[in-house]
């Protein structure tokens, strides 16, 4: 039984959302209701929140089920029905409710910081709303799901066995360099088969997204999206400065890491298939045998950080809110989906038994902890945190949990290998995020570009942030489509730089944890419990860290990570 589940007071318990008529009366009620006292306003807000929680969760389950089995046409049709038949009407009536709220004189009496944050978001939504965009957005959302369908069908055949790309990636850790090269080539050739299809898909999406931005009065989709994502606390120029900070302060450390790798492996040239194998040619780490063991070890690991954290994952397991195995027909990637009526999130991923799966599990587990901690908040608006906060929760848990990874590894040597891989990943992800983000800036500032211009732009930007030590000669055609691996470009445009911002925050929280674990966890929890009741800088301050991605702060945190890596390397 789910004791966290929201108790319905406005909607019928037996409501099944299979037509607009089933929910129309609730919108009509809210639109027509008189609001003449502050008590009535707060009741109206609570009823609206309940309606949105139920509807959001209905969409969530359609999305989750569709991703769990992309071969089931009924699941895809169920999701598409919501997007094409329900979503346009929901968006239209939500805008009417937004205006009803903002135009009510009593709104000026909502002076709590949580309500001020909520109201600025609602005003932003009103500002961006255009009725002519409703059908375009509905069509766009359907097209965005094509990426998952295409990617989920990508498999290779190796030694008579058909493998998903997730399974095949494990062989890139093989100590036999010939195996790594062969698998790399098979995977890359498989991606090239669908390269034109994905290029065309992105072109269609860019066209629709640009039209949406123009309709809303913006010169381009990038500037529209900066507002749409609610980036109230920093600007596009701040992001461009952050790109430079990463190039200046992170790229040199990545090159150092790759030089050590090249020397340790005794290679004259470091090739793209040499980047995942252990630097001492040890067999790939296997932190768990199957997903059942991954779940149990994660529960134990989180319980060591704080017993309540382990309990959260245990609840999800008992209620079957976890789908972790990789299989053909399952969409790629991993996510934690908050469910605002159940108040228990769902974790989706593609585990195949490697270290990356452990990192993904604790990352999504951090999101899950966040969902549980915000469950008591009264309104769904308070729970809907911006990405800079959501990813802080998950990325911090990756680093904090690392202190208890001895549960996953039998020897100190294996534990150090896992920590080295994790920290090298922390450093390495920042240039990749900057690459993907800067590429998206170019795409939408030049929406009428040709495919040749797109390819050249990617090559230029990828080389700007990529390691100069990795030799791609002879494999340029694979390098040129590297961006197609990143689902965010297709499904959630511009939602990516937040990973880099949050990674800095996570390093700062981990740094505090190394000094004072109890205080760091308390502040981490205090920050997450705020949901979105404070500004992003205020939430970071509650966590005991700075909301800062300037050159000097990036340098400070990178030097800390490098010092931790040096300690591990000294004993390895």
Image (cartoon, rainbow, N blue to C red):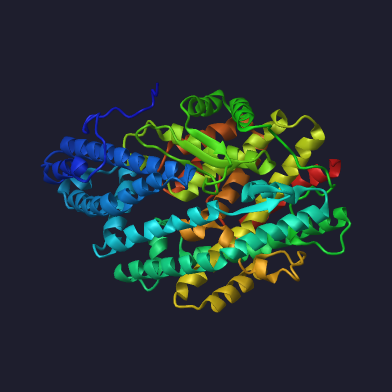
Instruction: Please tell me in which quadrant of the rendered image residue 416 appears.
Output: top right
Instruction: Please tell me in which quadrant of the rendered image residue 141 appears.
Output: bottom left
Instruction: Tell me the residue at 66%/44% (across/down).
Output: 356
Question: Could you tell me residue 280's position as x and y percent?
Answer: 85, 47
Question: Could you tell me residue 462's position as x and y percent?
Answer: 64, 68
The answer to whether one can see residue 222 in this image is: no
Depth check: give the residue in front, 225 or 26.
Answer: 26
Left or right of residue 485: residue 159: right
Which residue is outermost to the right? 266
Question: Could you tell me residue 417's position as x and y percent?
Answer: 77, 41
Instruction: Tell me the residue at 81%/59% (across/down).
Output: 259
Depth check: give the residue in front, 25 or 170.
Answer: 170
Question: Could you tell me residue 106's position as x and y percent?
Answer: 17, 45
Left or right of residue 376: residue 441: right
Q: Report the number of numbered marks.
A: 0
Which residue is outermost to the top? 1
Depth check: give the residue in front, 399 or 14.
Answer: 14
Depth check: give the residue in front, 259 or 561.
Answer: 259
Quarter occupied by the C terminus = top right
Instruction: Tell me the residue at 36%/37% (across/down).
Output: 340
The answer to whether one can see residue 147 in this image is: yes
Decide: is 545 above or below 430: above
Decide: is 331 above or below 549: above
Quarter occupied by the N terminus = top left
């Amino acid at each position: 039984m789910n004791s966290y589940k929201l108790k319905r007071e406005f909607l019928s318990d037996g409501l099944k959302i299979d037509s607009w008529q089933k929910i129309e009366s609730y919108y009509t009620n809210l639109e027509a209701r008189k609001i003449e006292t502050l008590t009535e306003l707060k009741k109206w807000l609570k009823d609206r929140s309940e309606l949105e929680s139920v509807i959001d969760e209905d969409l969530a389950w359609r999305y989750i089920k569709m991703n769990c089995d992309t071969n089931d046409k009924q699941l895809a049709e169920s999701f598409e029905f919501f997007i094409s038949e329900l979503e346009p009407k929901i968006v239209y009536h939500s805008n009417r409710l937004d205006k009803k709220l903002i135009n009510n004189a009593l709104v000026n009496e909502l002076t709590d910081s949580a309500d001020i944050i909520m109201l600025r978001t609602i005003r932003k939504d009103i500002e961006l709303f255009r009725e002519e965009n409703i059908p375009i957005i509905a069509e766009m959302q359907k097209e965005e799901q094509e990426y998952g369908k295409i990617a989920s069908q990508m498999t290779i055949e190796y030694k008579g066995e058909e493998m998903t790309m997730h399974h095949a990636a494990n062989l890139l850790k093989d100590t036999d360099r010939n195996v790594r090269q062969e698998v790399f080539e098979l995977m890359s050739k498989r991606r090239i088969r669908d390269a034109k299809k994905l290029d065309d898909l992105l072109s269609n999406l860019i066209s629709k997204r640009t039209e949406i931005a123009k309709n809303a009065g913006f010169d381009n989709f990038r500037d529209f999206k900066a507002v749409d994502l609610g980036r109230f606390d920093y600007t596009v120029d701040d992001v461009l400065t952050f790109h430079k900070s990463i190039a200046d302060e992170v790229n040199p450390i990545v090159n150092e890491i790759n030089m050590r790798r090249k020397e340790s492996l005794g290679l004259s040239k470091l090739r793209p298939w040499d980047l995942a194998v252990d630097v001492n040619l040890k067999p790939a780490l296997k932190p768990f045998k199957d997903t059942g063991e991954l779940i149990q070890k994660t529960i134990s690991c989180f319980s060591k950080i704080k017993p309540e954290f382990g309990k959260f994952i245990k609840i999800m397991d008992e209620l079957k809110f976890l789908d972790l195995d990789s299989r053909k027909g399952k969409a790629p990637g991993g996510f934690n989906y908050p469910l605002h009526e159940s108040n228990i999130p769902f974790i989706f991923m593609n585990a195949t038994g490697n270290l990356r799966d452990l990192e993904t599990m604790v990352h999504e587990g951090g999101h899950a902890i966040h969902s549980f901690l915000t469950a008591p908040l009264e309104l769904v608006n308070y729970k809907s945190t911006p990405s800079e906060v959501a990813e802080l929760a998950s990325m911090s848990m990756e680093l904090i949990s690392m202190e208890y990874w001895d549960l996953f590894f039998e020897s100190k040597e294996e534990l150090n290998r896992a920590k080295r891989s994790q920290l090298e990943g922390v450093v390495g992800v920042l240039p990749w995020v900057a690459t993907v983000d800067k590429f998206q800036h170019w795409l939408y500032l030049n929406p009428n570009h040709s495919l040749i211009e797109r390819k050249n732009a990617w090559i230029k930007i990828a080389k700007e942030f990529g390691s100069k030590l990795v030799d791609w000669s002879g494999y340029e055609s694979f390098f040129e489509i590297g961006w197609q691996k990143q689902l965010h470009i297709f499904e959630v445009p511009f939602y990516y730089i937040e990973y880099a911002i949050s990674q800095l925050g996570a390093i700062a929280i981990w740094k505090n944890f190394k000094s004072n674990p109890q205080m760091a966890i308390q502040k981490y929890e205090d920050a997450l419990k705020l949901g979105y009741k404070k500004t992003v800088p205020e939430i970071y301050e509650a966590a005991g860290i700075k909301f800062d991605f300037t050159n000097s702060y990036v340098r400070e945190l990178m030097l800390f990570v490098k010092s931790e890596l040096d300690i591990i390397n000294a004993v390895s």
